[in-house]
Image (cartoon, grey):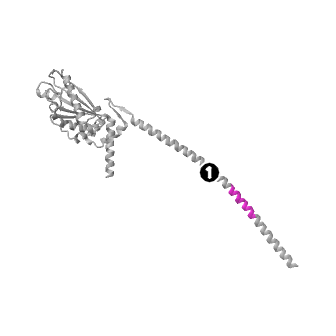
Amino acid sequence: MKKISILLLVALTFSCVSKKKYLALEHENGQIKSELTKTRVEKEDLEAKFAKIQARVTEYNTKISSLKEDVDVLTEKSNSKFETLKNGAVISNNAKIKMRATLANVDPSRLSQAKTLKDSMNLAVAYNLEKAINTNDIDEDEDIAVDINETVVMISISDKMLFNSGSHIVSSKADKILTKLADVINSEPSLDVMVEGHTDSRGINTDKIADNWDLSVLRATSVVRRLQHKFDVAPEKLIASGRSSYQPLTDNETWQNRARNRRTRIVILPNIDKFFALMAEKDTAVAENKILD
């Protein structure tokens, strides 16, 4: 009887302990479920906040891209704006950039003499045109004079190299120099070319030529026609003008001086912006060829 009582007491004791553990575990499980629910809610809340932030970031990036495009457009417009120099010439910021690239190749002693933007522009144009002329081997002697002034190149040719005395018909002996001139003109699509006829002060009057005005204009148009028809110079690039005897190089007292005053002057006028743009294209092409090589 005493043994049975002890066994019942032990059984009840173990039964109580197991129930307590069960209740404890159940409580713990409830807490874990509660934590999981809380964590899930927090996660969902964070995901919603992150989505909002991401949407704002995307919106800001779109605005930044739009602003960059606006800046690029404004920069391009700014670079395309022209600055007017005191002499009436114009140059854009794009041309300035290309001009600086050209000036990097100029002799430092010459570059140091450029004090203003106008000086720098003249020097850059002179450098490129000198290079074009030298490439085509135009030689200077007593009958040909090459002078670069401001942003133009002036090539003065004695009339005896182009015409017979008193005539406005271009002679065959002129083809050598006109070939070289045409090579220079055709090598640069940016160039306009004015052909000026100049005479001495002696009067002339024939059935076809009324005076020195007529002679100077007829000689200029004859050279223009020869450049166009024989040497394929685009006519829209050519200008013909006559100056008669009113811009002499010297007095007309001696036959030597009169010979100097009888001349045809070729004035090469570059379009500054187009000129530098073309030079930049050439430099880019050269660089690309070097890379390919």
Residue 8, picture quadrant: bottom right
User: Is residue 99 visible from the viewing direction of this image?
Assistant: no
Residue 46 versus residue 181 in the image, above or below: below
User: Is residue 30 magenta-colored?
Assistant: yes
84 sits left or right of 64 in the view: left
Question: Magenta stretch: dominant SS?
Answer: helix
Query: Residue 207 at what x, y percent from top left?
Result: 16, 21
Q: Which residues are magenta?
A: 24-37
188 sits left or right of 160 in the view: right
Badge 1 amino acid:
Glu
Which residue: 49% across, 43% down?
Answer: 65
User: Is residue 97 visible from the viewing direction of this image?
Assistant: yes
Residue linked to disc 1: 47
257 sits left or right of 82 in the view: left
Query: Residue 109 at what x, y percent from top left?
Result: 25, 41
Residue 248, picture quadrant: top left
Which residue: 35% across, 40% down?
Answer: 97
93 sits left or right of 24 in the view: left
Q: Nearer the viewer, residue 241 or 250?
A: 241
